[in-house]
Image: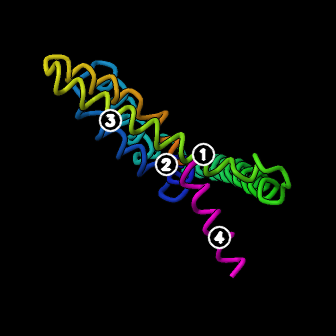
């Protein structure tokens, strides 16, 4: 995503934006990076870095964005191939994998929310720690719910295709 953004807006604009953003962070590392980026931007505007070099850097970024897009396309093609293979399968378990996964996700969510409610009611002093611990599960829930969302979307497409 970043390479695609960079390819669209160009290196000088991105350097200025990132420099300003980092400059607002109270950290020696962020301040140092902001200063270095600001110096690079100043050098570009003053001509110390030739426009040809900036154009070449932009070409490299565009190529990186292109490669990134190719990876995303291959990934999506593989996911779609897997879903088509699953839909065509005669194996009952493979055909029921999506609903099974959905039920497992729903039960997991219910168990987690039930545990949170239980701790909040029975031991409110520990509720903050439990909520914080549950927040750290955000990435795994994002992955699981994303997979479930793809399953639901693809199943809806299958139903529409059947008429």
Q: Which mark is residue 36?
A: none
Q: Which residues are magenta?
A: 147-163
Separation of marks 1 and 2 at Cα, in angstroms: 7 Å
Residue found at x 63% / y 53%? 62
Residue 57: which quarter of the image?
top right
Residue found at x 46% / y 34%? 139
Task: Out of 51 and 1, give the one closest to the viewer.
Answer: 1
Any magenta on residue 161? yes
Q: Which residue is mark 3?
A: 113
Majority secondary structure of the magenta segment?
Answer: helix
4 or 1: mark nearer the eye: 4
Q: Position of residue 73 (x, y in %)?
A: 71, 55
Residue found at x 40% / y 45%? 46
Label 1, residues with CA under 10 Å away: few <14, some 14-19, many ≥20: some
Question: From the viewer's perspective, is residue 123 above or below residue 42?
Answer: above
Q: Earlier in the sequence, mark 4 or mark 3?
A: 3
| Mark 1 in CB contact with mark 2 (< 8 angstroms) | yes
Q: Earlier in the sequence, mark 4 or mark 1?
A: 1
Q: Is residue 93 left or right of residue 56?
A: right
4 or 3: mark nearer the eye: 3
Separation of marks 1 and 3 at Cα, in angstroms: 50 Å
| Element type at mark 2 | helix
Separation of marks 4 and 2 at Cα, in angstroms: 41 Å
1 or 3: mark nearer the eye: 3
Label 2, residues with CA under 10 Å away: few <14, some 14-19, many ≥20: some
| Mark 4 in CB contact with mark 2 (< 8 angstroms) | no
């Amino acid at each position: 995503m970043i390479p695609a953004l960079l390819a669209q807006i160009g290196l000088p604009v991105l350097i200025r934006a990132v420099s300003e953003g980092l400059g607002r962070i109270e950290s020696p590392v962020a301040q140092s990076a902001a200063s270095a980026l600001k110096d690079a931007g100043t050098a570009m505007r003053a001509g110390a870095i030739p426009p040809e070099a900036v154009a070449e850097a932009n070409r490299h970024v565009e190529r990186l964005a292109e490669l990134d897009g190719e990876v995303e396309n291959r990934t999506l093609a593989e996911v779609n191939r897997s879903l088509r293979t699953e839909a065509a399968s005669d194996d009952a378990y493979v055909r029921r994998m999506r609903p099974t996964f959905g039920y497992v996700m729903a039960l997991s969510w219910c168990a987690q929310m039930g545990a949170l409610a239980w701790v909040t009611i029975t031991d409110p002093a520990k509720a903050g720690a439990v909520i914080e611990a549950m927040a750290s599960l955000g990435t795994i829930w994002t992955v699981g719910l994303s997979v479930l969302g793809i399953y639901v979307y693809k199943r809806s497409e299958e139903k529409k295709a059947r008429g």
